[in-house]
Amino acid sequence: MNGSEPGAISAGPSRASLLSAWKLSKSYMTGGKVTPVIGELSLTLEPGEIVSVVGPSGCGKTTLLNVLCGLLAPDGGEVRWRGARLAGQPSDVGYMLQKDLLFPWRSALANTTLGLEIRKVPRAAAESRARALLDQLGLHGFADFYPSTLSGGMRQRVALARTLVNDPAILLLDEPFAALDFQTKLLIESDTAKLVRNTGRAVLLITHDIEEAVSLADRVIVLTARPTRVKAVYDISLGEDRTDMIAAREHPRFADYVRRIWSDLEVSRS
Amino acid sequence: MNSNPIASADAGQILDRKPPAPRSRRVYNIFLTQIAVLALLLAVWEFFTHGNKLATFLFASPSTIGGFLGKMALDGSLWTDMYTTGLETVLGFVVGNCIGTLIGLSFWYSRFVSAVVQPFIVALGSIPTIALAPIVIIWFGTGLASKIAMSTLSVVVVAIVTSYKGALGVDPDQINLMRTLGARKFQIFRKLVVPASLTDIFAGLKMTVGFALVGAIIGEFMSSSDGLGHAIFKAGSLYIIPKVFAALVATIALALVLTFVVGKVERILTPWRSID
């Protein structure tokens, strides 16, 4: 195996990282039986870094994400944001799922300003920021449309705008592009990479799509089956420009990364 | 960043689809057929009762009912009765739905409270409203208040159940999203739970228009000096059957008007749904 060993990631709870998880564990009770989902999992996310997490289906990736952003409390271990132990909801995290979760009673614009409204940003300022972002995401002229009148790709772009408008330091993305057709997916991935890399945000992308994981990320973390832990970590180097998903997929090393990660997942399925 | 080819291609498709003409023609055809069916029923009714004194006495006939409607409209009793019953119904409808919706939505705040209260709601819902009428008359008197109370009682349990169902139906992922955006519980309630419940609340409102009207009329049956229920009860006691039917027609007209108004209000308050 060419990836580094799990133990090498961190010797203890990291204080410097933007986000670090140390020996996390989490179990569910189902019908009086304890099902361990996460077992002693550690990872870190540095400022400006894009990290993909891949794992066999049902390995608890979503549970991991919910623990990292404070929606679920871990049974053991700890999560640190900028070195401080997580208590409640971190304020500068953006959270995006496969479902766009747009509110049907709000226009694209009003969906985008949701987070700013919650933080009581004055309406005029919030709307001009949201409009600028919607324009950047190719939704010029659609600000006043209700979600029900937009296509899947456009809806997911609005969801991305809703996430980015709050200026989060970290984006936690749970298969946000999985429901999109291939062409739309590549375009949104490229747009996301541009917006994220130009502003130095960090991203933790959970996905089952190995090609997506490799083409977007600086680092790919491979998880084992349940109770999930880190199986391998790959540093991805695919040249200088990492905002063009087609170029990334055409890079000579791309296929090699994909093959190695695929074989890791094959093994952990058994 | 460049404008996006996918986004604009999608936009073209969305704006072009659905030519509206066939749909409105279909609606028009349905309406015409409904009028024809109604006319046929009235004609058959008139045919079998015409010139037959006993049949006309027992079953009335469209022409005698029409005669009574005209007479009641001219002497003004039709309008005062419709106004009285309409006022009772609207007030009972509004009070019952406000109370019920507030209670139903507030259950979202506390699973514990809602679990404690649930069996009491079921018990209250299983009481036929008519069984409460004598007590309501004693407590609220024979005037407007007792009719509003009857109407409110007919509405409130349905309003509680439908609004609570709506509040429970909110997508937990949307609640998580609100939490990650830093929303406090009240913000989640106001910006997500309340608007998300509107679909169920309006379904309840449409259902309870009829219940509110039934409640008001039961109240008038028990004790009253005017209103459509009073007119029906009095005409029935005197065996003036066409007048009973005339008051029934007025009751149906009132129900249709109120349902129409609720539908209009729904379209105004939930504009995102009329796009479909």
Image (cartoon, rainbow, N blue to C red):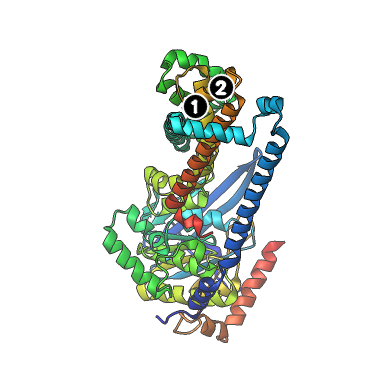
Q: Which mark is residue B216?
A: 1
Element type where label 1 sits in the image? helix
> Could you confirm whether marks 1 and 2 are on the same chain?
yes
- Residue identifier under label 2: B235
Amino acid tagged 2: Ala
Above/below status of B27 relative to B108: below
Viewed as shown, does residue B62 lie left or right of B74?
right
Would residue A144 be visible to someone looking at this image?
A: yes
Element type where label 2 sits in the image? helix
Residue A7, horizontal then vertical, whole percent = 53, 62
Find the distance from the CA under tag 1 to the CA under tag 2.
Answer: 18 Å
Name the chain letter of the residue that bears numbered label 1.
B
Above/below status of B165 relative to A16: above
Residue at the image point whose x is 43% and y is 80% from the top: B3
Residue toward you, B117 or B227: B227
Amino acid tagged 1: Ala
Q: Which mark is residue B146?
A: none
Question: Looking at the rendering, which quadrant does residue A17 occupy?
Answer: bottom left
Residue at the image point whose x is 54% and y is 29% from the top: B214
Q: Which of marks 1 and 2 is in front?
A: 2
Residue A16, horizontal then vertical, whole percent = 36, 62
